[in-house]
Image (spheres, helix red, strand yellow):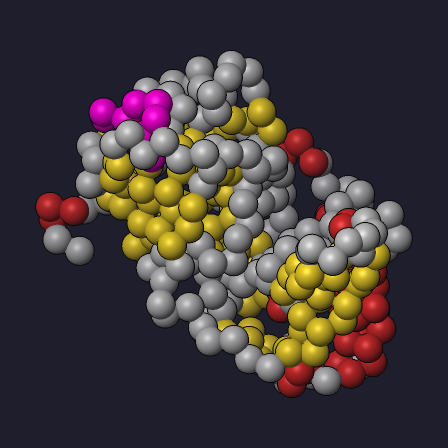
Amino acid sequence: MSASVRPKAVPTSSIHKTWNRKLPPALTVRPGEVVFFDALDASGGAIDRNSNTETIANIDFRRLDPLMGPVYVEGAQPGDALQIDVVDLKPYDWGWTGLMRDFGLLASEITEPYLKIWHLNGDEIEFDSGARFRLHPMIGNIGVAPAKDGDYASISPTNAAGNLDCKFLGVGSTLLVPVFNEGALLSASDGHAIQGDGELCGTGIECRMEMTLKLSLIRAANLKAPEIYVADTFPAEEGYRIFMGIGPDLMEAAKDSVRHSIAPLAKAQGISELEAYAMLGLIADLRIHEIVDQPNWVVGCMIPRRLF
């Protein structure tokens, strides 16, 4: 990267736990400049590579999803769109997947804590069965300050973006976010080494991550909600086994699709059902397949066929 586009680093001391448009900027940039986040993982450092199940069973939810920033973009005004081009994402050399109390799609049914530490020294992870998955680093939580005064939880996505947890927000992709305040006030965090659509168990592979982003403005864009332009280099899809949930309640249909998949995956991989559920957060994609033939919805939990 040439000196003319050398990233400006967001101060590591700029950690905050809520979206709030009154927060003072931690960094000011001009449109077209590149910024660098050394972003904390979703646990805010509460989990390290030596943590165990007891750590996650007693985790302090007040530490989760810390943000860094905000970054003030000169000239940004309400009605504009902030264009965020994902230049580079570099996970640290380890990450974690966990099941936390009262969190995840089946939190009311699967209550036992679980934690797995992953070593991220290459571009793949390997299950105990030998199944391999290529890493696809992505940003979980990124957005701008909301339109109204007050503190808003960092974990909740809004039309100002935030905790989108969209697996397509990787290197080469572009996120457009409506601007609601002067300067936009961008914050980010929550790197994932890999995650499936829906982040079903509540986590992917959570990791600290170096994020390099280029910030630009689109004047008077008048976006109503965030948009993502997906890079052509996103890994090609493969064959799937789709477990379906069908019913008049969308959330229950989604839960049913996951419930139906856990035991078959555990049996095929020779792992516990608890671990199988945790693995769904990494490699399963949750999709709405049918939405118009009322009164029932059709939701699919899509798992690569090669795991069976």
Q: Which residues are magenta?
A: 71-81
Looking at the picture, tell me which residue is in the foreground, 122 or 80: 80
**Residue 106 vs residue 84: left or right?**
right
Q: Residue at x 72, y 41 (%)?
A: 59
Which quadrant holds residue 61?
A: top right
Q: Quadrant of the N terminus?
A: bottom left
**Residue 202 vs residue 234: left or right?**
right
Q: Residue furthest right?
A: 109
Up the image or down, 223 lies above or below 265; here it is above
State how many labels appear.
0
Residue 8 spot, x, y in % from top left: 25, 39
Residue 264 spot, x, y in % from top left: 82, 77
Q: Residue at x 66, y 31 (%)?
A: 62
Residue 280 spot, x, y in % from top left: 69, 65
Looking at the picture, tell me which residue is in the foreground, 211 or 258: 258
Q: Residue at x 23, y 26 (%)?
A: 74
Q: Quadrant of the C terminus?
A: bottom right
Looking at the picture, tell me which residue is in the foreground, 126 or 73: 73
**Residue 182 vs residue 124: left or right?**
left
**Residue 169 vs residue 268: left or right?**
left
Up the image or down, 122 lies above or below 143; here it is below
Q: Which secondary structure dominates the residues rendered in magenta?
A: loop
Which quadrant holds residue 12?
A: top left
Which quadrant holds residue 253?
A: bottom right
Residue 177 spot, x, y in % from top left: 40, 38
Q: Residue at x 55, y 50 (%)?
A: 165
Residue 236 shows up from this direction? yes
